[in-house]
Amino acid sequence: MTSEEAPRTVHLLWSGGWSSTFRALTALRLEGAQVRPHYVLDPLSRHAEMEIDAMRRVRDAVREASPEQADRLLPMASVGLDELQEDDAEAERFARLNARAELGRHYEWLGRYARHAGLDGLEVGSHRHDALTALLDGNLRPVRERPFTTYRLSDEALDTDLGLFAGLSFPLAELTRADMRRIALEGGFLETLELTWFCLTPRRGETCGVCVKCHAAVEDGLGHLLSPAGHRRHDLKWHSSWRPWQRVVDRVVG
């Protein structure tokens, strides 16, 4: 890129979570791109406040480390979920896909948001082994190679139920969260990456340890990011063989 060229703009659905924050930081640090974060506020979310606070912490850390990179982390574009036009046909497509893969409910409205924002190729943080990339296996085509291979939906899949994700792109589809941790450690931004949030059902502002996202964090080697109480609840829920006790933990956090 010459001094006269403007940096490429990465449009990224940023949730304040591990994967999307990793993507934001690598776009800033490895590509010299500017990043336009996008966020859809779900009124039913129990963790939106935590996500927004995590994004603020990451912004502060980026600015402290590099004001120049902070200038390329553009203001957030956000919208309320109730502002997105509903589509019954897409809801039906999602219901069929969800029956196959148990996707998170937010995947139903990602395509709607991309159209609402006039975006083609909105980046999402789906990574290797997560529910969506597993569902898309064999139905993606590479569109860009650096710094990681970015994928879009294949032409053959556009007319199937998977066409729900036609407006999205997947820059992390080949990376595990362990890969991201290694890259961040080598790149000197792991401390910033660990400011992220992942818990779905926070308890008194801390990670619950009970939800599937907390469990996935532990399984992926990120258990140190749980609160001490969250760790205890995680072990009771996920490592106890006594199912009534598991239900008690779910009910208490619930």
Image (cartoon, rainbow, N blue to C red):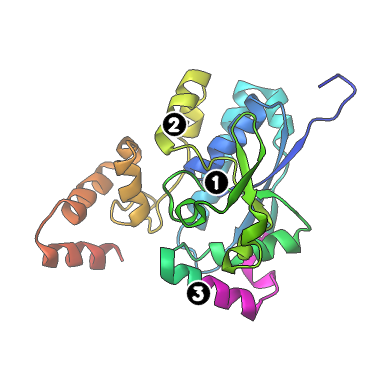
Q: Secondary structure at mark 2?
A: helix
- Mark 3, residues whose alpha carbon is within 10 Å: few (<14), some, or many (≥20)? some
- Lower sequence index among marks 1 and 2: 1
Q: Secondary structure at mark 3?
A: helix
Residue at the disc numbered 1: 125
- Please state, as top left, top right, bottom left or bottom right, where the N terminus lies in the image: top right
Q: Is residue 54 magenta?
A: no
Query: Which residues make up the magenta segment?
Result: 79-95
Name the residue: 41% across, 57% down.
200
In this view, which residue lies farthest toward the bottom? 88
- Please state, as top left, top right, bottom left or bottom right, where the C terminus lies in the image: bottom left
Q: Is residue 92 magenta?
A: yes
Residue 67 in view (yes/no):
yes
Check if mark 1's residue and mark 3's residue have beta carbons within 8 Å.
Answer: no
Left or right position of 47 against 82: left
Name the residue: 25% across, 47% down.
229
Check if mark 1's residue and mark 2's residue have beta carbons within 8 Å.
Answer: no
Residue at the disc numbered 2: 179
Q: Which numbered disc, 1 or 3, marks the residue closer to the eye?
A: 3
Q: Disc 1 marks which amino acid?
A: Gly
Residue at the disc numbered 3: 95
Name the residue: 34% across, 55% down.
212
Count of marks placed on residues: 3
Q: Is residue 221 above or below residue 94?
A: above
Rounded to the nearest whole Å, what is the CA distance between mark 3 and mark 2?
31 Å
In this view, the residue in front, 68 or 218, is: 218
